[in-house]
């Protein structure tokens, strides 16, 4: 199969023809390396190469290369040097304080509906000429439609649909990426290995323009790298040639993010969940909590003031049997919640889960149980992340 997008039929969303099933720009590259491909978020994607457990542990110990080109890469901008109109418009939609976000800095934020429900979670970076927004692949077409509907006509939304996205994650990621000799594209950009967590910049490699951020979805130190389609095979091949780097599939990406206590949209987050109940209050910037003014703020700030009825929490299970999404959580004989994500944690050696549980039963150390096929599995409320994160922050104690 070629590396171009392949599809059998298409649908029309907001004037755009969207293929029903797409392929990644590295589709052939994955298949050549023995990847087992599955459909996910409308794309054929590699779920594993040599096995989820081995790939998970390799990423924790070395460096894993993930193809996340299904995600949406968007630029929101306006003509001219003054981007304050873009800032104000995005602040009407997101609960982030973009006024204090410096060029090259990243924030985790949320796209909310009028009732405070979560439409998507995303990463937003301030560029000199606007904001770079990375959204989830499963929701990107709806996100684009939502943004187009709510952005003024003078503000431009550009979908960078000819750029792929790679994630290099793990304790040896920085050394592996630095070994390729990336060059900062601007005089005030630091070498790639000196970027700090949630910092980004433009780089160049073999004539290819790259957008690099020190961030990721594994709980490990690492990077996300935006690469034009015409250079992505060459770049991915160069990374994978490093002794410490192996390609990693969706299966290990999911188990890694679960250990890090990170939510997955469509499972842990949805329009039926709000930021407070989802345990994402940190995404509500201080000024926005005080002033509101973002979509859904009346409801969100009311829940913040009164406390949520349910809360997303972490659970440690005894034994080896895992609880999956949809399993019911009990306090004694009373159902108090539902698992939203669960599985075996390779780094920890036991099952873990995230669940939405009645607020009265969410204190750390609370003993609960989870019904798995009629058997009650003992579980204890524990703090998240389950596995300590190892993000790189300049000046932090080693």
Image (cartoon, grey):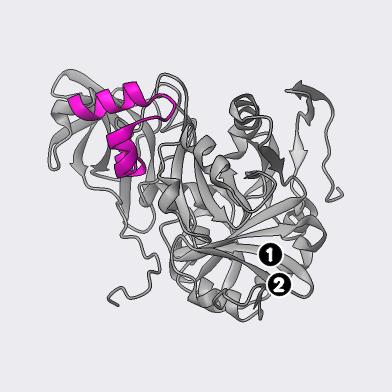
Residue under label 1: 210
Do the numbered discs 2 and 1 sit on residues whose CB atoms are within 8 Å? Answer: yes
**Image quadrant in which you'd find residue 155:** top right
Q: Against 271, is 256 above or below?
A: below
Q: Which sits in the foreground, 47 or 373?
A: 47
Q: Which sits in the foreground, 203 or 391?
A: 203
Q: Is residue 205 in view from this perspective? A: yes
Disc 2 is placed on an element classified as: strand
Q: Where is residue 207 shown, x and y percent of the image?
A: 79, 73
Q: Is residue 258 left or right of residue 329?
A: right
Neighbor class of circle 1 (other Cα within 10 Å; few <14, some 14-19, many 20+) is many
Q: Where is residue 305 shown, x and y percent of the image?
A: 20, 28
Q: Against 280, is 327 above or below?
A: above
Neighbor class of circle 2 (other Cα within 10 Å; few <14, some 14-19, many 20+) is some
Residue at 30% across, 73% down = 396
Q: Is residue 294 magenta?
A: yes
Mark closest to the chain's N terminus, 2 or 1: 2
Seen as rendered, the residue at the extreme right is 2
In magenta, the rendered stretch is 279-307
Dominant SS type (magenta): helix
Q: Is residue 148 magenta?
A: no
Q: Is residue 184 left or right of residue 60?
A: right
Q: Which sits in the foreground, 139 or 347?
A: 139
Q: Where is residue 272 shown, x and y percent of the image?
A: 41, 21
Q: Which sits in the foreground, 105 or 2?
A: 105
**What mark, if any, has residue 204 been given in the picture?**
2
Instruction: Using the numbered discs, state the Cα–Cα distance from disc 2 to disc 1 in whole angstroms.
Output: 6 Å
Q: Where is residue 73 shown, x and y percent of the image?
A: 65, 46
Q: Is residue 44 left or right of residue 369?
A: right
Q: Is residue 307 left or right of residue 295?
A: left
Check the picture and name the quadrant holding the C terminus.
bottom left
């Amino acid at each position: 199969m070629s590396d171009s997008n392949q599809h059998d039929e298409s649908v029309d969303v907001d004037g755009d023809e969207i293929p029903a099933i797409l392929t990644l720009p590295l589709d052939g590259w994955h298949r050549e390396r023995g990847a087992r491909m599955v459909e996910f978020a409308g794309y054929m994607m590699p779920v594993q190469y040599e096995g989820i457990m081995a790939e998970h542990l390799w990423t924790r110990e070395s460096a894993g290369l993930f193809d996340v080109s299904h995600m949406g890469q968007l630029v929101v901008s306006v003509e001219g040097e003054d981007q304050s109109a873009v800032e104000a418009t995005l602040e009407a939609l997101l609960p982030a304080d973009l006024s204090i976000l410096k060029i090259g800095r990243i924030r985790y934020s949320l796209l909310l509906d009028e009732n405070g429900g979560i439409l998507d979670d995303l990463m937003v970076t301030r560029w000199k000429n606007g904001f770079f927004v990375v959204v989830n692949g499963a929701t990107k077409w709806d996100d684009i439609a939502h943004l187009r509907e709510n952005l003024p006509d003078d503000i431009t939304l550009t979908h960078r649909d000819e750029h792929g996205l790679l994630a290099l994650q793990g304790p040896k990621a920085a050394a592996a990426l630095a070994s390729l000799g990336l060059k900062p594209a601007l005089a005030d950009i630091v070498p790639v290995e000196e970027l700090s967590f949630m910092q980004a910049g433009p780089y160049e490699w073999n004539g290819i323009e790259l957008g690099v951020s020190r961030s990721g979805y594994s709980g490990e130190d690492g990077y996300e790298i935006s690469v034009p389609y015409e250079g992505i095979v060459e770049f991915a091949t160069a990374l994978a040639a490093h002794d410490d780097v192996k390609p990693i599939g969706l299966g290990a990406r999911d188990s890694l993010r679960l250990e890090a206590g990170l939510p997955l949209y469509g499972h842990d987050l949805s329009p039926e969940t709000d930021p407070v109940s989802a345990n994402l209050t940190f995404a509500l910037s201080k000024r926005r909590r005080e002033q509101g003014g973002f979509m859904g703020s009346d409801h969100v700030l009311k829940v913040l003031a009164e406390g949520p009825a349910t809360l997303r929490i972490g659970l440690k299970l005894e034994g080896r049997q895992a609880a999956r999404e949809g399993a019911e959580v009990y306090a004694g004989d009373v159902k108090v919640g539902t698992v939203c994500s669960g599985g075996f944690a390779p780094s920890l050696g036991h099952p873990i889960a995230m669940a939405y549980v009645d607020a009265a039963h969410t204190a750390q150390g609370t003993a609960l149980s989870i019904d798995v096929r009629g058997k009650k599995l003992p579980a204890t409320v524990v703090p998240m992340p389950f596995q300590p994160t190892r993000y790189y922050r300049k000046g932090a104690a080693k």
